[in-house]
Structures are given as structure tokens and as C-alpha cells.
Amino acid sequence: MFEILPLLACEPMTLLGASLAISAASAASGYAAQRNQAKAVEGQQRRMGKLMMEESLLDQADMRQRQVQMQEATRREQMDIARRTDISKSTATLSALESGVGGAALAQLQGEYLQREAELLYQTEQQQDSASYQIDRDLERMRLSSKARMASNYRPINQPSAGAAALQFGGQALEAYGTYKAGGFGELPPKK
């Protein structure tokens, strides 16, 4: 009526051997799967780390470019201030000379223009220094943020252990042997 599976009809020693073979295959495949998983995680971490580093370098390059552009704009503004001051001073000097003003009064007039020019140049220099300092702080924040992201990305990987796989197999082998000795695979052959 019912067919008995051929494996269950085997002798107890054959069943023990089959059980040990299955345990060994299970431990080996588990170890291989864990090793493959660890390699995959490591590869992903490397790829993400490379992308993070590239992004950080691009962001820092953008910030440095902005800093250079700001310095160039400040230089242009300072040149414009000097040009406008020279024009205003020349016009005022000419007007004063045509009005008959000279000597100390003319020197004082020219000194006022030079003082105003120095004040404006100093203000632009202070603005540039402040902005440059802010960019340096932003760059340092970016470096620290990148460092933290990299540390977060490169978390330790749970590497498989051949010893643990061997112990797992050993435990399963002992369990199978105990089952064999207890008659769990059928009647034991008589001892000679």
C-alpha cells in the first residue's frame, strides 16, 4: 500500500553516513554563503566610500573656486575704489586750484580723499577676510562630515569563521552519532 522511501530502508550505518554528509554539506554551504555575503558587503563599502570621497572632493573644489572668485571680485572692487577716488580727487583738486585754493587747504582736501579711499579699501579687505574665514570653516566642517560618513560606511564586517562552521558540523555529527547509538536509525547490527 505505502511505498517506503529507499533511504529509510537503509541500514543504520548508511543513515548515519548520509546524516553526516548532509551536516557537512550544510556547514560548508553556510560558511560559503557567509563568506560571499561578507565579500559583497566589503565591495559595497568600497564603492560607497569611493563615491563619498569623490563627492567630498568636488564639494571642496567648489568651495575653493568660490573663494577664488570672491578674492577676484574684491580685487576688482578695490581697483574700482582706487579709480573712483583718483577721479574724485583729481576733479576736486582741479576745482580747488581754479578757485584759487592752494597750500595746506589743498593738501587737507587731498588727504580727505586718501583717507576715504583707505577706509573703503579696509572695509572690502575685512569683508573678504570674513568671507574667507567662513569658507575655511565650511571646508573644515565638510572634511569632518566626510570623515564621519566614511567611518559610518566602513563598519566592521561580520566575517565567517571556519572554526565555527567546523564546530557546527561537529555538533551535528555528535547528534547524529547519538541518534545512531540510541537506535534512532533503526536496529543496530549485532556485535560480533
Image (spheres, helix red, strand yellow):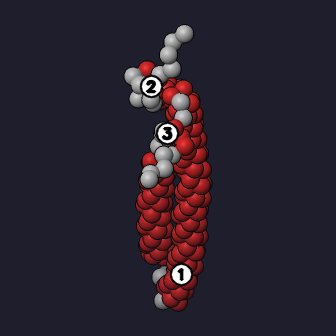
Mark 1, secondary structure of its residue: helix
The mark that comes first in sequence, 2 or 1, is 1
The mark that comes first in sequence, 2 or 3, is 3
Q: Can residue 27 be seen in this view?
A: no
The residue lying toward the viewer, choosing from 179 and 87, is: 179
Residue 149 drawn at (x, y percent): 46, 51
Residue that carries the numbered disc 2 in the rendered image: 187
Residue 181 drawn at (x, y percent): 43, 20
Classify the position of the C terminus by image quarter: top right
Residue 90 drawn at (x, y percent): 56, 82
Answer above or below: position of 7 versus 121. Answer: above
Residue that carries the numbered disc 1 in the rendered image: 84
Q: Name which residue type carries label 1.
A: Arg
The mark that comes first in sequence, 3 or 1, is 3
x 50%, y 28%: residue: 12
x 49%, y 39%: residue: 8
Residue 8 is tagged as: 3
Residue 174 drawn at (x, y percent): 46, 23
Q: Is residue 146 visible?
A: yes
Q: Name which residue type carries label 3.
A: Leu
Answer above or below: position of 162 versus 42. Answer: above
Answer above or below: position of 137 versus 180. Answer: below
Q: How far apart are marks 3 and 1 (CA)?
A: 105 Å
Q: How far apart are marks 2 and 1 (CA)?
A: 112 Å
